[in-house]
Image (cartoon, grey):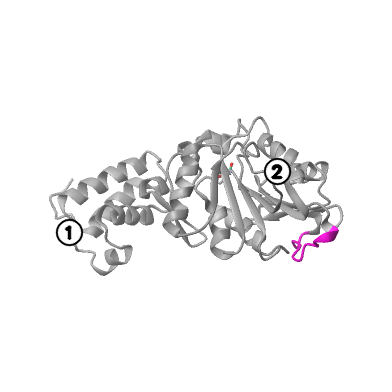
């Protein structure tokens, strides 16, 4: 410890040294921003500025929690997704940038201007709200099995002024008896023995949002069991999955009766989600992925 005045720059440097990991300086700046209410740019512009002792104490306590591994998103209480600022808490998965690839693909599908859309296992509401922000004329339903997630997604929808109908439902159990032009989901898909469950942010996220049986595919099987009966003819299903589950998920889609099936990659070029269409001839996919080896069935 030193008796030197605690300037922003000194506090950030000291914290970054103890935080370590991939982006220690960024983490420290974000946490000082959270404690002080000052912007990150201000730390560059006025590095000598001195926060009050109360702010310093609050910053140090956030840094301690970060050192123990708590996700930055939990410490800040928010995460950006598709340029939307979403509130997050430990009751749901923290939205990942890779899921934006699924949103982008959904927006490129040949869907009616007033499509009926369902987001299964919405969590913070990330996918549903991103779609609502781009397609105000779609009717978007979103559900989650956890009441706390439904409340969080509702708070996010209200804060963003976006219209999504939210309800509690364990997959299709309480979904209204209607069909959809598009069903999307980022379900739990991690195998229960996966070693990465012991590392990083996932340690602080609910198992119910991550883990899905011995091969990680239990929930995707359940979704595929009912989705074809809930799609309009020519409707689409998009499901996120693990980088090593593409082949298995394509097989499940085909077995469920989808006749156009394709896996696409995330920003890191890893398999990340599979899309399928029943009665594909009614609605040919306009934008097939470049890698033909990922395609199965009629296209
Ligand atoms: N992609 C997440 C991870 O980092 C898992 C998300 C999920 O199970 N839906 O492990």
- Please say whether residue 288 is one of the residues in the magenta stretch: yes
Kindly identify which residue carries mark 1: 50
The relative height of residue 110 versus residue 255 in the rendered view (above or below) is below
- Name which residue lies at 57% across and 54% down: 128
Question: Quadrant of the rendered structure where residue 252 is?
Answer: top right
Q: Is residue 162 left or right of residue 114?
A: left
Give the camera-side residue of 113 and 25. Answer: 113
Magenta segment: 281-291
Quadrant in which the C terminus is drawn: bottom right
Q: Residue furthest left?
A: 3
Q: Magenta part mainly helix, strand or loop?
A: loop
Measure the C-alpha gap from mark 1 to mark 2. Answer: 50 Å
Quadrant in which the N terminus is drawn: top left
Give the camera-side residue of 142 and 212. Answer: 142
- Name which residue lies at 70% across and 43% down: 245
Q: Is residue 155 left or right of residue 182?
A: left
Q: Is residue 164 left or right of residue 27?
A: right
For marks 1 and 2, the one nearer the N-term is 1
Question: Quadrant of the rendered structure where residue 5 is?
Answer: bottom left
Structural crowding at the residue carrying mark 2, measured as other residues with C-alpha within 10 Å and reported as few (<14), some (14–19) or many (≥20) = many
Residue 235 in picture, x, y percent from top left: 75, 55
Q: Circle 1 — which element?
A: loop
The relative height of residue 113 versus residue 78 in the rendered view (above or below) is below
Residue 224 in picture, x, y percent from top left: 73, 41
Please state the quadrant of the image where ligand 1 appears. Answer: top right
Q: Circle 2 — which element?
A: loop
Residue 174 in picture, x, y percent from top left: 62, 38
The relative height of residue 101 versus residue 199 in the rendered view (above or below) is below
- Name which residue lies at 45% across and 59% down: 160
Kindly identify which residue carries mark 2: 245
């Amino acid at each position: 410890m030193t008796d030197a005045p605690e300037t922003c720059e000194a506090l950030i440097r000291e914290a970054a040294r103890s935080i370590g990991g991939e982006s220690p300086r960024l983490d420290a700046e974000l946490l000082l921003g959270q404690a002080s209410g000052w912007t990150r740019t201000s730390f560059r512009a006025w590095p000598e500025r001195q926060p009050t002792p109360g702010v310093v104490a609050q910053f140090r306590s956030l840094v301690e929690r970060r050192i123990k591994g708590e996700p930055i998103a939990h410490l800040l209480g928010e995460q950006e997704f598709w340029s939307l600022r979403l509130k997050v808490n430990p009751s749901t998965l923290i939205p990942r940038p890779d899921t934006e690839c699924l949103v982008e693909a959904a927006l490129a599908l040949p869907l009616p201007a007033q499509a009926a859309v369902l987001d299964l296992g919405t969590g913070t509401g990330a996918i549903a709200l991103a779609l609502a922000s781009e397609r105000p004329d779609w009717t978007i339903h979103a559900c989650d099995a956890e009441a706390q997630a439904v409340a969080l997604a509702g708070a996010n929808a209200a804060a963003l002024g976006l219209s999504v109908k939210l309800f509690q439902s364990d997959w299709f159990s309480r979904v209204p008896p209607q069909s959809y032009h598009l069903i999307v989901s980022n379900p739990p898909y991690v195998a229960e023995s996966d070693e990465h469950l012991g590392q990083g942010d996932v340690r602080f996220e609910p198992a119910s949002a991550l883990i899905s049986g011995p091969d990680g595919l239990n929930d995707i099987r359940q979704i595929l069991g009912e989705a074809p009966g809930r799609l309009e003819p020519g409707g689409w299903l998009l499901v996120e999955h693990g980088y090593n589950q593409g082949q298995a998920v394509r097989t499940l889609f085909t077995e469920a009766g989808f006749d156009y099936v394709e896996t696409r990659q995330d920003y890191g070029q890893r398999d990340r989600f599979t899309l399928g269409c029943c009665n594909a001839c009614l609605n040919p996919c306009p934008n097939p992925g470049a890698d033909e080896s990922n395609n199965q069935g009629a296209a």
